[in-house]
Amino acid sequence: MNDKIVQQFQEKHESLAGIVHQVSGTDEAVEKVASILQAKAAEKVALAILPEEFGRAIEQHCAQNKIELLKPPFDAARLPQALDSIQVGISWAAFAIAETGAIVEFSTDDALRLVSALPLVHISVMRAADMITRPSRLRAARPQV
C-alpha cells in the first residue's frame, strides 16, 4: 500500500472532521475500537456486517464489558427506533477515496446503512489496501454493460 495514499486520505478525512487511526492488524483494530467505545462510555452499540474474526472479537469485547449489542439480522421496522439509543455504530468500508476523504460502504439493505448514519459516533474500519486515490479509477474498473 502506498503510504502517500493513506496520508492523503487521512489529511482530507480529518479536514472533514473525521478521525483516522492507523493500526497494524485485526488485534490492534479491536483494541482501538474498544478504546473508542470506552472513551465514549458506550452502553449500546450497533454492528453492520463485519469480517468474521473482527466481528467476533468486537462481540466478545461488548459481552465482557456489558455493552448491549444490536447486530444483523435487524428487524427493519424497529431499527430506526432502536438506533435512537445507540451511541456507536461500527461498519466495514468497501473502500475509501483519498482525494475526497470519503468512505464507501456497499449495502443492499437499508437497515444496515442506518448503522453508519444514525448513531452520533460511527466507526468505519477498512484495510489500507482498499484506499484509492480518486473516483475516476472506479470507472475504469467497472464492467461495461
Image (cartoon, rainbow, N blue to C red):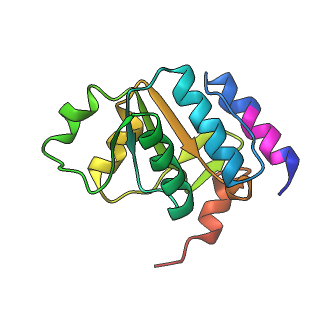
Q: Position of residue 17 (x, y in %)?
A: 61, 21
Q: If the image is split into quadrants, where does the C terminus sit?
A: bottom left
| Quarter holding residue 136 | bottom right
Q: Position of residue 13 (x, y in %)?
A: 66, 32
Magenta segment includes 83: no
Residue drawn 71% across the image and 41% down it: 99
Q: Position of residue 69 (x, y in %)?
A: 35, 41
Q: Residue at the location (31% across, 54% down)?
A: 72
Question: If the image is split into quadrants, where does the N terminus sit?
Answer: bottom right
Residue in the picture at 17% in, 50% down: 75
- Most extreme residue toward the right is 3
Rendered location of residue 89, percent (x, y)? 42, 37
Q: Quadrant of residue 16?
A: top right
Can the viewer see residue 25?
yes
Q: Is residue 86 above or below residue 134?
A: above
Taking 70 as reference, is 42 above or below it? above
Residue range highlighted in magenta: 5-10
Residue visible at 12% across and 45% down in the picture: 77
- Is residue 81 shown left or right of residue 111? left
Callout count:
0
Front residue of 8 and 90: 90
In this rendering, is residue 41 above or below 25?
above
Secondary structure mainly formed by the magenta segment: helix
**Left or right of 101 in this view: 129:** right
Q: In the rendered image, is residue 101 in sight?
A: no
Query: Which residue is farthest front?
Result: 64
